[in-house]
Amino acid sequence: MLEQVIVFAIVLSFIITVILSPIFIPFLRRLKFGQSIREEGPKSHQKKSGTPTMGGIMILLSIIVTTLWMTKKFASLSVETYLLLFVTICYGVLGFLDDMIKVVMKRNLGLTSKQKLIGQLVIALVFFFVYERSGFSTALHIPGTDLSINLGWGYVLLLIFMLVGGSNAVNLTDGLDGLLAGTAAIAFGAYAVLAWNQGQYDVAIFCVSVVGAVLGFLVFNAHPAKVFMGDTGSLALGGAIAAVAILTKLEILLVIIGGVFVIETLSVIIQVISFKTTGKRVFRMSPLHHHYELIGWSEWRVVVTFWAVGLLFAMLGIYIEVWI
Amino acid sequence: MLTYGMVKRLCKQARGIVDDTISFRHVFVDPYQHAPKGLFVPLGRGAETLNIAIEHGAIAAFWREEEELPRYIPNQFPLFFVASPLQALEKLLDSYRQWESDTDEKTTFHLTISAHNGRIDSYDIAVLDALKQLQQKWTDAQGKEGCDQSC
């Protein structure tokens, strides 16, 4: 009977996002364009740049409702559930502030990168203290082996690095229609399998709720996108995937299951270093998805290829953990 | 004010009308920036942003040598070919500070790109990073010389 929750959760969160989106999209559109249309008058290009952002709100609402409802009904609300929701909501709120300032003030000011980083650090620290107090282990498991290293206080550094790095990496991947929604669905799907395999049903229900929510969002975010998730969605998903990796004690495996996010981030790091030191570019444009776009791939082709790569990484991750 | 001649000196090759009396009120990197009589510096996809920049007041632009010219550009529209528009902008800022005289009407430099969140406004993160430093350098220099309308 317990298995049914997986189906229920995925369908429920999918439906919630699909129902919420048509309600929220016109509202987000007004929020973004209401003023500027009045100020500048209608112009041809407004159609082109007219996709509203902050669609992450729909994803977040759907995740919260589904996770709480399904976990309460089929398992029990645990510290893990609250921790996962805490991280997701807090990173979502941080992203929302950033989006909101950009949209309302119409400037690239947003939050400064320093403010954003401080916000990310504070959330990660709160997560650590709750996590520590609930008596979780600070050991780091090496995937595919029986080895574990107890990091002790070093674990706090790893945890912060994962949450901050994860949310930023996922944030970078959000650049083409449907790219992040698809790759996130795959990565959370993989973690759902692994969490279920460990008997952590509460974590699995959360993961599945995310899968349903982003798949529902994909209906509106696939090319040509009617809405973008914005930092509201991407920071939340990034924080959430890192938190899931921590709670399932599969920290290192995140590098593989989130391989697409890692590659995107590396492309940016390489490009920035190369551009600063030699003045030359390694990629035509970073993050990597833009490079492929500029060498002539269609947006759709880039997105589908990245999904396929994400799927392969996810399968590899499950293989390493379950069969090796 | 910045003139055609000053910009021309910074590039190897130019295209379009040659007129040393053209002067630029604005220099801008964000195609959506309202910049009448502006010189546009394309830092992203030139072909997809120049038409938007023209709509917002560009009367000339830098152009990356390797990039193909879109058909919509009028024959007389002045383009300055450079290896890297970003480096050209940096040189331009340095030279402008030497040329600038107190009595002269000033050119405004807009060195930020606002978030429009569409396909055409995706920029290389490395470029945005460099632009930020350039802007910082520029505002610092402006601060030292006393603030005018350009800061």
Image (spheres, helix red, strand yellow):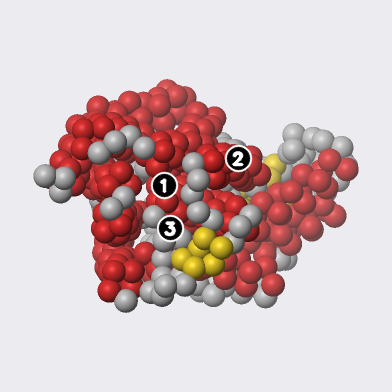
Disc 1: which residue: A240
**Image quadrant occupied by the C terminus of chain B:** top right
Residue B127 is situated, as x and y percent measured from the top left of the image, at: 59, 60
Q: Judge depth for marks 1 and 3 and give the one in front.
A: 3
Q: Tag 2, which secondary structure?
A: helix
Disc 3: which residue: A249
Distance between mark 1 and mark 2 Cα atoms: 15 Å
**Residue found at x 36% / y 26%:** A30
Q: Residues within 10 Å of mark 3 (few under 14, many from 20)?
A: some
In the rendered structure, which disc, 1 or 2, sits on the residue that comes first in sequence?
Answer: 2
Q: Nearer the viewer, residue A223 or A316?
A: A316
**Residue found at x 50% / y 54%:** A137
| A5 horizontally vs A195: left or right | left
- Is there one chain holding both mark 1 and mark 2? yes
Do we see residue A221 in this rendering?
A: no
Tell me which chain the residue with mark 2 is part of: A
Distance between mark 3 and mark 2 Cα atoms: 22 Å
Q: Which mark is residue A296?
A: none
Q: Nearer the viewer, residue B126 or A130?
A: A130
Contact between marks 1 and 3 (CB within 8 A): the answer is: no
Q: Amino acid at mark 1?
A: Ala
Q: Amino acid at mark 2?
A: Val
Res B60 → quadrant: bottom right
Disc 2: which residue: A122
